[in-house]
Amino acid sequence: STTLTEEIMSATVSEVGQSTDSITIGDLCTNSAAIKFTMPTSTIPLENGYFQLEHGVLVGSEYVWIPMGTFYISEIETTEGSNKYTVKGFDRSTRLEKDYVPTVTLPTTVEKVVKDICTQCNITLATYTFPNIAIETIYEGSCKDTLKYMAGLMGKNAKIDRYDKLAFYWY
């Protein structure tokens, strides 16, 4: 992996807590980021790649680096002949677009369905104490749609946090 510091011209992270103008429960909010930089002499492959952002906070005389997340590249912009690039990406929730094929036995619980989705989509679950909610039938759809339904049953929304883990939170 390549670490850029001096080459970075700007970086932004857009954390979303609500995907609409109204308060909802059972939503999955996807964070995005963009980074503008000068390509180093040894070219970095960007296609199908990802980037990780950290924010440096000066504490005393040293910087403490705070992770802002991992973002999977969705767009690459450059001007022909220029070594200046802008890449944009979305967090790990983009892995949830595939169809959910349950491996849990019914009846089950919200916790087991969420963990099944995380396993299938290679997503780590943040520490969370699940309510004991029984699931008699499985919502048919994508992993994302099923996860949103599970979050709604708990009265929560979901997102990928800055540590790249699936987290549930109050709207």
Image: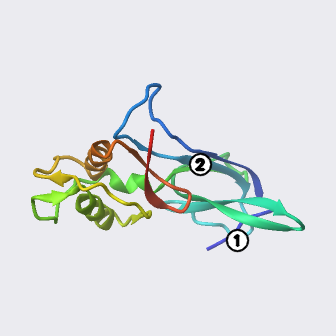
Quadrant location of the C terminus? top left
The residue under label 2 is 33
Q: Nearer the viewer, residue 53 or 148?
A: 148
Element under disc 2: strand
Q: Amino acid at mark 2?
A: Ala
Closest to the camera, between mark 1 and mark 2, is: 2
Q: State the residue lying farthest toward the front.
A: 132
Which circle marks residue 42 in the picture? 1
Name the residue at 33% across, 63% down.
118
Q: Amino acid at mark 1?
A: Ser
> Does residue 88 lie above or below 65 as drawn?
above
Residue 84 visible in the picture: no
Q: Nearer the viewer, residue 131 or 146?
A: 131
Element under disc 1: loop
Residue 133 visible in the picture: yes
The first of marks 1 and 2 along the sequence is 2
